């Protein structure tokens, strides 16, 4: 029996109440800050956020106390422990344990305090490493995960299943969305904790500034990746909350991809690096290709609007303006 056949929700999506209290978990992160900006631009008047110093989402009692006090009507769960291949590969316990606790605490508290509409955000790494491309939503749990980030993926899969369970048991119209690789203002440009595009931006910009003769990247450069600007992601989140309902997660992406080598060449051009690019093939490539099928998203009435060249240029500009205050 499919998730759709078990679903107990009878709900017709519509415009959200602009005066309803809206909690963005992870509002200082890449995705959460973009969602906050989008909601403000769309006229939402009662946005709520807490930094990790103000509210540790791994602390169950603190999370329940927060929900008891604020009683949000809407929630986007964008908070997560995230990182690139190196961080995921080296610290799988942290990525599994931290994300499971964050998700369970927030979702359980949201259930207890009657959140009307909730969006859980995962990642495209939930899909099998060798899933047919482009990856459809029904590829979930049909094969082995990419081993370099399987712990993080399992945590996100658990979140999807908890959303489906809440729908089935309590009839609440909560939904899940799975974004592709995201980038943009507010990203993590740490040398050890960042994802591929911000890591390349920092590496090439530092090389350009120092006059380095060459840059060395991990792997072969042949894996293909899809990139979505985070402002597009934020727009998609609000659109889904107002136009989509169903137990199955929705892929959020552009529907097109490029090789890591191509993205590296583009970044080198944008930052003005004229040296050589070398590839350390002793390092892992990760998944060979990860392109999402975005048909379900298109059927819901939304497509991406920010092109990669435009988005990358603005991200490089943001990085340069904020490089002195970036997290390490």
Image (tube, rainbow, N blue to C red):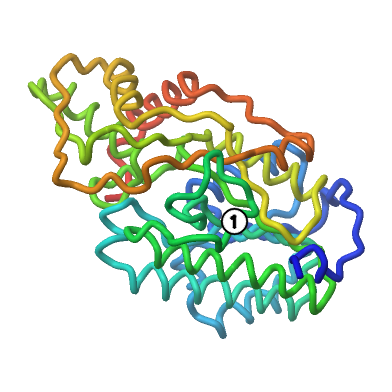
- Quarter of the image that includes the N terminus: bottom right
**Rendered residue at 74%/81% (across/down):** 112
Q: Indicate the position of residue 123 as horizontal and vertical percent values.
A: 52, 53
Residue 136, how many percent across, how many down?
62, 46
- In the rendered structure, the answer to whether residue 135 lies left or right of residue 217 reads right
Q: Is residue 284 left or right of residue 304?
A: left
Residue 86 x/y as whole percent:
26, 54
Of residue 151 and residue 127, the one placed in the foreground of this image is: 127
Would residue 171 be found to the left or right of residue 100 on screen?
right
Image quadrant of residue 116?
Answer: bottom right
Q: Residue at x 23, y 35 (%)?
A: 220
Q: Nearer the viewer, residue 220 or 81?
A: 220
> Does residue 48 appear anywhere in the picture?
no
Tell me what residue is drawn at x 75 percent, y 38 percent.
42
Q: Which residue is mark 1?
A: 121
User: How many other residues sit within 10 Å of disc 1, few (<14), some (14-19) or many (≥20)?
Assistant: many
167 up-or-down from 238: above or below:
below
Q: Is residue 312 visible?
A: yes
Q: What is the tally of numbered marks visible in this picture?
A: 1
The furthest residue to the bottom: 61
In the picture as drawn, the residue positioned furthest to the left comes out as 213
Q: Is residue 197 above or below residue 285?
A: above
Q: Secondary structure at mark 1?
A: strand
User: Looking at the picture, does residue 109 appear above or below residue 324?
Assistant: below
* Residue 322 pos. (x, y %): 35, 35
Residue 114 is drawn in which quadrant?
bottom right
């Amino acid at each position: 029996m499919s998730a759709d056949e078990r679903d107990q929700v009878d709900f017709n999506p519509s415009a959200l109440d602009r005066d309803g209290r809206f909690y963005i978990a992870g509002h200082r992160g890449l995705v959460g800050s973009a969602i906050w900006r989008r909601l403000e631009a769309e006229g939402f008047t009662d946005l709520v956020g807490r930094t990790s110093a103000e509210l540790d989402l791994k602390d169950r009692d603190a999370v329940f106390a927060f929900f008891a006090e604020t009683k949000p009507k809407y929630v986007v769960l964008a908070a997560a422990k995230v990182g690139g291949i190196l961080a995921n590969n080296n610290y799988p316990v942290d990525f599994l344990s931290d994300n499971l606790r964050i998700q369970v605490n927030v979702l359980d508290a949201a259930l207890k305090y009657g959140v009307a509409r909730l969006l859980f955000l995962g990642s495209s790494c939930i899909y099998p490493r060798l899933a047919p491309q482009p990856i459809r939503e029904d590829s979930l749990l049909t094969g082995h995960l990419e081993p370099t980030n399987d712990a993080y993926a399992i945590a996100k899969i658990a979140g999807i299943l908890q959303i489906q369970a809440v729908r089935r048991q309590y009839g609440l119209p909560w939904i899940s969305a799975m974004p592709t690789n995201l980038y943009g203002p507010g990203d993590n440009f740490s040398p050890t904790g960042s994802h591929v595009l911000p890591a390349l931006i920092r590496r090439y910009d530092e090389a350009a500034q120092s006059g380095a003769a060459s840059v060395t990247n991990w792997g072969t450069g042949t894996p293909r990746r899809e990139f979505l600007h985070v402002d597009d992601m934020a727009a998609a989140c609000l659109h889904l909350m107002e136009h989509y309902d169903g137990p199955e997660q929705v892929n959020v992406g552009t529907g097109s991809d490029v090789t890591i080598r191509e993205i590296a060449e583009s970044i080198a051009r944008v930052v003005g690096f004229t040296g050589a690019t070398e590839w350390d093939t002793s390092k892992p490539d990760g998944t060979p290709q990860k392109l999402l099928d975005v048909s379900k998203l298109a059927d819901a009435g939304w497509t991406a609007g920010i092109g990669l060249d435009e988005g990358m240029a603005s991200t490089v500009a943001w990085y340069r303006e904020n490089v002195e205050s970036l997290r390490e």
